[in-house]
Amino acid sequence: MKATNYKACLALEVPAYVAFYKSQPDFIGDDVLTIEVKYAGGRTEIQKITINVAGPGAQQKI
């Protein structure tokens, strides 16, 4: 991942992964997903992520 003009850094490059999530229509509650990350050299890592899906107008915590 590359970022420019981030806080005091003019250029930043770090390893990253990106995942897109979209809940089923009208779903509210906790949803759990698992991502398998494969690194160069053969190492594999499992990431378990819990996403809280709130209803319309609910305050989002980031």
Image (cartoon, helix red, strand yellow):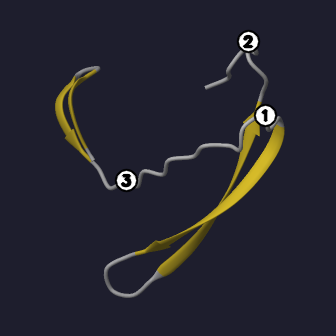
Q: Is residue 14 above or below residue 52?
A: below
| Crowding near the residue tagged with mark 3, few <14, some 14–19, many ≥20 C-alpha atoms within 10 Å | few
For image coordinates 32% across by 56% down, the residue present is 15
| SS type, badge 1 | loop
The residue sitting at 27% across, 47% down in the picture is 1
15 horizontally vs 36: left or right: left
Q: Where 44 sits versus 18, above or below?
A: below
Question: Residue visible at 73% across and 12% down?
Answer: 57
Tag in front: 2 or 1: 1
- How far is the residue under mark 3 from the one under mark 1? 31 Å
Q: Mark 3 to mark 2: distance in Å?
A: 30 Å
Q: Nearer the viewer, mark 3 or mark 2?
A: 2
Q: Can you identify the residue that label 2 sits on?
A: 57
The percent coordinates of residue 9 (x first, y second) are: 21, 27
Looking at the image, which is closer to me, 28 or 50? 28
Given the image, on which type of amino acid does mark 1 rest? Asp
Q: Describe the element under mark 2 as helix, strand or loop.
A: loop
